[in-house]
Image: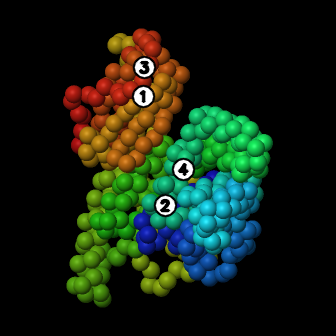
Amino acid sequence: MPGRVIIFSGKGGTGKTTTSAATAALLAEQGLKTLIISSDPAHSLSDVVCQPIAHDEPTLLAPNLYALEIDTFQEAQNTMGGFQRYMENSYEKGGAAAPVAAELAAQPGLDEILALNRLREEADSGQWQVVIVDTAPTGNTLRLLAYPELIVGGNEGKNFLKVYKGMAGFIRAFKQSTPDEKFFNEINRLIDIMRQLNRFLLSPQVSVRLVMNAEKLSLMETKRAYTFLSLYGIGLDAVIVNKLLPPASAQHDLGPYFDYWANLQQKYLQETEQSFQPLPILLSYLERSEPLGPKRLAELAVQVYGSLDSASHLHKQRTIWVEEQKSQALRYLCLRVPLVEDVSELSVNRDGSELFISFGRIQRKVSLPRILNDAHYKDFSYQEGVLRLSFETTPVLATGGPLKTPSTWVRSN
């Protein structure tokens, strides 16, 4: 049976590694067989738990607690070795020195995809009751979570590879340098990995927890991450505000310097609670000593989660659904896209049975439910964090092209 998966993300320096490790240590103490995985290329998990961690197989840290720091280079060699070698040889034939060719052959994002796939394999192995993931800073993580939908063009990607594979076989007969069978097998495997990852990230077993500090830049980045995750249908179940100073009224020995920072944190904490309602906002205060090692980490997690079950989904909400208004023969495709301040940045295009929804530089492809395939698109509105696309249920042929932009924007309060 697949294990529960909790992905921790946040701006660099907010304390993701400590918070994720604390959650894992607490779950292990509670008797759940727990694996914590670091997918951050700059691993610091071993520093937090004060023990060396292997890169190939999980390392036992304490009863029920295991850890793995993924070696993305080795994952790439194991999965895409033939692809990498062909690319290296191509660059060398073009005149590049071997070390340069090896660097050029490293495809951007491939290591991150394979790190995510290793996570999926561990989660689906049935060995673990809970898998905790310590990720790279927010920007890298969001790119990582979007790859399964962005990198491969679905059936179009597969059809292109079939045509190219046929052409390569024809050209090879004339002794030209083209990829061999292993190259195409690995590419096809990569496409299958993408599809599996897409299903995995949208499955009920997976949720994300964002770690932030009570300061302006961290709050702004966390808001953007919330919008991004919602647009891609990935569940966010809590926000953890880390490194808090005690409120000024409770301080008797830190003086006016720290009183200023404590009051500023309280201001941003109030804004955080207003921005992310109804998500749980969990608070983590600075300790009197560094929380290092499984025992101290578990104690920190008790302070953060209190009576909550840290392994459960702390919050659940729909990210995409269909509503019906029978009196007017209308159906609405609704997507939760919170914290959109400038609605003019939202745009929607339709291509047959697929929608392309864009917000700034973020774009998601959404396949229409069958019930809307033949419906005529009317317009869309945005209110209270929900993007609502209306369809007339009278069957018409979808012609593609840009969707009609509503003349009146409905803004969220």
Residue at mark 1 to residue at mark 2: CA–CA distance? 29 Å
Q: Is residue 302 visible?
A: no
Which secondary structure, mark 2?
Answer: helix
Instruction: Give the x, y percent position of residue 203.
Output: 60, 43
Circle nearer the N terminus (3, 1): 1
Circle nearer the N terminus (1, 4): 4
Q: What residue lies at 49% left-to-right and 68% top-to-bottom?
A: 16
Instruction: Give the x, y percent position of residue 11.
Output: 42, 66
Q: What residue lies at 22% left-to-right and 28% top-to-bottom?
A: 407
Asked if residue 228 is positioned above or below residue 44 in the image, the reply reads above
The quadrant of the image that shows the C terminus is top left
Q: What residue lies at 45% left-to-right and 61% top-to-bottom?
A: 138
Q: Is residue 117 visible?
A: yes
CB within 8 Å, label 3 to label 4: no
Per the image, the residue denoted by label 2 is 140
Instruction: Give the x, y percent position of residue 307.
Output: 51, 61
247 or 336: which is nearer to us? 336
Which residue is the extreme one toward the front? 174
Residue at mark 3 to residue at mark 1: CA–CA distance? 8 Å
328 or 283: which is nearer to us? 328
Q: Which mark is residue 350?
A: 1
For label 4, the crowd category at 10 Å Cα-Cα, with few meaning under 14, some 14 to 19 and many 20 or more, is: some
The residue type indicated by label 1 comes to: Arg
Per the image, the residue denoted by label 4 is 147
The residue type indicated by label 4 comes to: Tyr
Instruction: Give the x, y percent position of residue 188.
Output: 70, 44
